[in-house]
Amino acid sequence: MKRGKKYQDSAKLYEKINLHDVKDALDLCLKTAKAKFDETVELHVRLGVDSRHADQQVRGAVVLPNGTGKSVRVLVFARNENADAAKAAGAEYVGAEDMMQKIQTEGWMDFDVVIATPDMMGVVGRLGKVLGPRGLMPNPKAGTVTPDVARAVEEAKAGKIEYRLDKTNIIHCPIGKASFGEEKLQENLDTLMDAIVKAKPAAAKGQYIRSCVVATTMGPGVKINPARFVAAV
């Protein structure tokens, strides 16, 4: 794969095979943020589990202490007083069958998070083939199916992110923007890793945290020594 000049220059800043502590890894990662926009910093964690087995799934949600730096558009499926509460909490879009039809007939997808009250899942369930592949389907484990929609909206706005395994047993999550600086990014990273460690399935065998990598949107990955997190499992 042919890489751009900025990427190649960034890759020369360190040895890609070396493992770093979190502070040094984030410092190196920020030095690779050379794009003209405020790059997102992402964490990629490979786990020693098998996502093909239901008892080894790792999924949940956590509110990052410093947010993600991204403006989040929230869609809430609710009725009556729950709909009013969602609007008061700052949800951009609130509705029921009308929102379902808008998505189905118009292909409307101008939202980042979907929240629903339990009684609305019969309606939302019809959108499974649309929302599911995009990771937007409301889920109780992620706190997006809840009777307390106001709190869910507030958490989404504050920087709540969902983490889940992909088919290769890796979790990919944003932990902020390059402009946050090393200290705030480390606080977010530690919060996310603490949640992932606590979510270890009982059926998981062997080393749970296999590898950790941080990278900016346009930069190369920097490896974090997983020993720090292995000790916490």
Image: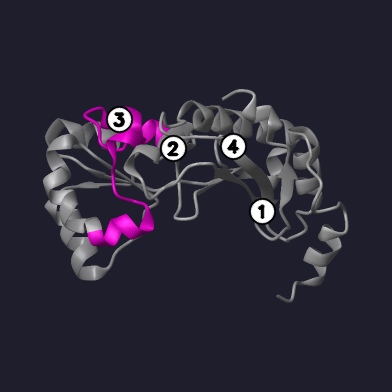
Q: Which residue is mark 4?
A: 209
Residue at (12%, 37%) from the top-left corner? 119
- Tell which circle, 2 or 1, labels the residue nearer the N-terminal end: 1
- Which of the 4 image quadrants contains residue 102? bottom left
Q: Quadrant of the N terminus?
A: bottom right
Q: Is the Cβ of the residue at disc 2 closer than 8 Å to that at disc 3?
A: no
Q: Residues within 10 Å of mark 3 (few under 14, many from 20)?
A: many
Q: CA distance from mark 1 to mark 4?
A: 26 Å
What is the magenta range? Answer: 129-156
Answer yes or no: do the residues labelled 1 and 4 have beta carbons within 8 Å?
no
What kind of residue is marked 2?
Lys
User: What is the spatial separation of the Cα atoms under label 3 and label 1, in whole angstroms?
Assistant: 30 Å
Q: Earlier in the sequence, mark 3 or mark 4?
A: 3
Position of residue 127 in the picture relative to residue 72 (left or right): left
Between tags 2 and 4, which lies in front? 4
Near-viewer residue (125 or 71): 125
Which secondary structure dominates the residues rendered in magenta? helix
Residues at marks 2 and 4 touching, judged by CB atoms closer than 8 Å: no
Q: Which mark is residue 157?
A: 2
Image x and y of residue 156, in percent: 41, 37
* Residue at mark 2 to residue at mark 1: CA–CA distance: 20 Å
Color style of the picture: one colour
Instruction: Using a 10 Å C-alpha cutoff, classify the residue at mark 2 as few (fewer than 14 neighbours), some (14 to 19) or many (20 or more).
Output: many
Between marks 2 and 1 in the image, the one whose residue lies nearer the viewer? 1
Element under label 3?
helix
Query: Which label number is shown at residue 150?
Result: 3
- Depth order, front residue of 150/123: 123
The reply to whether dot 3 and dot 1 touch (C-beta < 8 Å) is no
- SS at badge 1: loop
Q: Residue shown at 82%/66% (left/top)? A: 8
Instruction: Give how far apart the Cα atoms at labels 3 and 4 are.
Output: 34 Å
